[in-house]
Amino acid sequence: EVQLVESGGGLVLPGGSLRLSCAASGFTFSSYSMNWVRQSPGKGLEWIAYITSRSVPIYYADSVKGRFTISRDNAKNAVSLQMNSLRDDDTAVYYCARDGRDARTTNEIPFDHWGQGTLVTVAS
Amino acid sequence: DIQMTQSPSSLSASVGDRVTITCRASQTISIYVNWYQQKPGKAPKLLIYAASSLQSGVPSRFSGSGSRTDFTLTISSLQPEDFATYYCLQNYVIPPTFGPGTKVEI
């Protein structure tokens, strides 16, 4: 069974930093691209970062580019999100999500499995 | 960025009803649309990918259709566990973008 478990959320001051982690199990982690997606309280979903199985290429949403860094450790089956210069509007539940693969076409299937999410609150 | 709109933003329905949710893209995106269901306090769950492919384990009462700019998610006979918010997502280009959601209520 595919499992993704996020950790590292919490309360942080504006301008502060936080590092989120996502532990993966139940699949060959090194073969799949991974993402971070966030959801502000009561709001919709926003994709923020993507990393391929070999860590290249990497893409970010404009809203976090230059402040957030996604990385992965295939030996530890984990993906991380380093968040710096945090702002009030970064307050959200952060999910890690796997990109699956269509067995017929080998195309990636976006966000076929999600973690339970971890809450990040940026406030003074 | 490609903008995704959904209609309606919410709807009231009864068990057994046929429900249709529409998603429209701001430019043509072939069949690169996916549908997710989210219940309160839970992570989203993938229902449909590539416009009409049913994700493994998802009941067959869910179906998707459409191409280019207009897409629909249909629930053929609404069940009690289907009351949730539904989101479309385009993955034709980066950044992938979600629609604002459709809340299906009793």
Image (cartoon, rainbow, N blue to C red):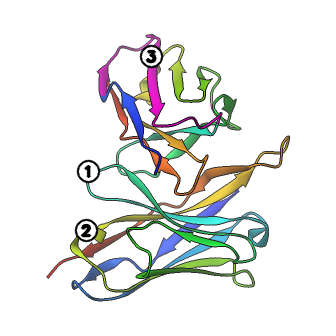
Where is B12 relative to A14, above or below?
Answer: above
**Pointer 1 and pointer 2 on the same chain:** yes
Q: Is residue B38 visible?
A: yes
Residue identified by numbered label 3: B19
Name the quadrant of the N terminus of chain A: bottom right
Where is A41 relative to B81, above or below?
Answer: below
Tags 1 and 2 touching, CB below 8 Å: no
Gap in Å between the C-alphas at discs 1 and 2? Answer: 13 Å
Gap in Å between the C-alphas at discs 2 and 3? Answer: 34 Å
Residue identified by numbered label 2: A89
Q: Which residues are magenta?
A: B10-31
Q: Residue furthest right?
A: A104
Tag of residue A10 = none
Gap in Å between the C-alphas at discs 1 and 3? Answer: 24 Å
Residue identified by numbered label 1: A42
Q: Please provide percent x and percent y for residue A110.
A: 62, 51
Q: Please provide percent x and percent y for residue B35.
A: 54, 37
